[in-house]
Amino acid sequence: MKEPSFISVSITILFLILLSGCSSTDDEILNDEVIEDLLINDTIHEDIEDLISETEDVPTEQVKETLTFSWNKDSDSRINDGSVPFIHKLKDGRTRLYYCNGENILSAVSTDGISFVKEQGVRITKGTGFELSVCDPTIVDLPNGEMRMYYKGANKLGGPGLGSIHKIYSAISTDGLTFKKEGIRIDSETNGDNGWASVPDAIVLQDGRIRIYYVTAAEMEHSIGSAISSDGLNFVKEPGIRVRNLVDPALVRIDDRYLLFAASINDGFKSLPRGVYYLESSDGLNFDEPVEVFKGDNVYDPSVLKIDDKTIRVFYGKINPPQMGIESYTGKIVE
């Protein structure tokens, strides 16, 4: 306990002096009782001071600061006749933009992440059945130096309710240009997605597992769900919904945070105008409220390039009737 305060000690001494002149036994008894009461009150006062001091010393819970970006629209378009971009950083410092044109997956390459040159050939060619249309590529780098692409395959064009069923497939490559198809990874007809597992975005976790975020109709509305795999081939659907009512996920890690970029493409989410948003998470499963990147009609399918620890570039599809194109915004973290 702390030493008695100066004021408390002074009051006690004053009372002792005043009471010292009394000589009767009764007065002595009374004096002793008064002094005892004063000492008790002084002790209570000290206890209260200690309690206040201890309360002030308890550290308050730190409020997590969300990341804030300053966004600027990049001039012109990245690609003029493509859509549904996925941007992938190559080991030599260049970036490759995978995108859709018609019903196949193509690519273009860049040295600065702004000006892209189209590459010859087709990366993934449409097939039959549920690969009658292929699109929505995403790439992960494997420990052995290979690349694995996950992509959407559909039996026909069109959205849910129009007979279109979307599933997620994979293909493997040693150079990022020539891919060998591996088969289905997420079967929306048997996985609880009500025939709609689409627009995948894959990320390698710190423990080496791969998580795919994708658009699901699991609850009969467009939301973002996820599935996880230890080998990149066999995926287990994770319980719950990651983000409701937004679509077209794109993930990036900044320090210890996951940032999920997504699009609002219709009026189903009344609180959010159409445009592109991002949400933060510490575990990749539970995300905070959406934060606006930009508003706009006919924008969809964001993909994110981490330029450095403070800068990212968001690529997205844009319909400029009668043509589709790919545009971008660059964001810098505001300190």
Image (cartoon, grey):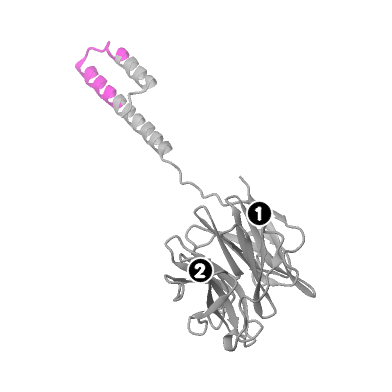
Residue behind mark 2: 146
The answer to whether any part of residue 198 appears in the image is no
User: Of callouts 2 and 1, which one flags the residue occurring earlier in the amino acid sequence?
Assistant: 2
The reply to whether the magenta stretch includes residue 50 is no
Range of the magenta residues?
17-37
User: CA–CA distance between discs 2 and 1?
Assistant: 30 Å
Q: Main secondary structure of the magenta part?
A: helix
| Front residue (pair 244, 179) | 179
Q: Residue at x 75, y 64 (%)?
A: 77
Q: Residues within 10 Å of mark 1 (few under 14, many from 20)?
A: many
Please identify the quarter of the rendering in which residue 306 is found. Answer: bottom right
The answer to whether any part of residue 280 appears in the image is yes
The circle on residue 331 is: 1
Secondary element under disc 1, as helix, strand or loop, is strand
Please identify the quarter of the rendering in which residue 300 is found. Answer: bottom right
| Front residue (pair 21, 227) | 227
Residue 230: x, y in percent?
42, 70
Q: Residues within 10 Å of mark 2 (few under 14, many from 20)?
A: few
Q: Amino acid at mark 2?
A: Glu
| Front residue (pair 212, 141) | 141
Residue 39: x, y in percent?
29, 25
Residue 51: x, y in percent?
37, 36
Q: Residue at x 22, y 12 (%)?
A: 23
Q: Is residue 38 above or below residue 144?
A: above
Residue 209: x, y in percent?
44, 66
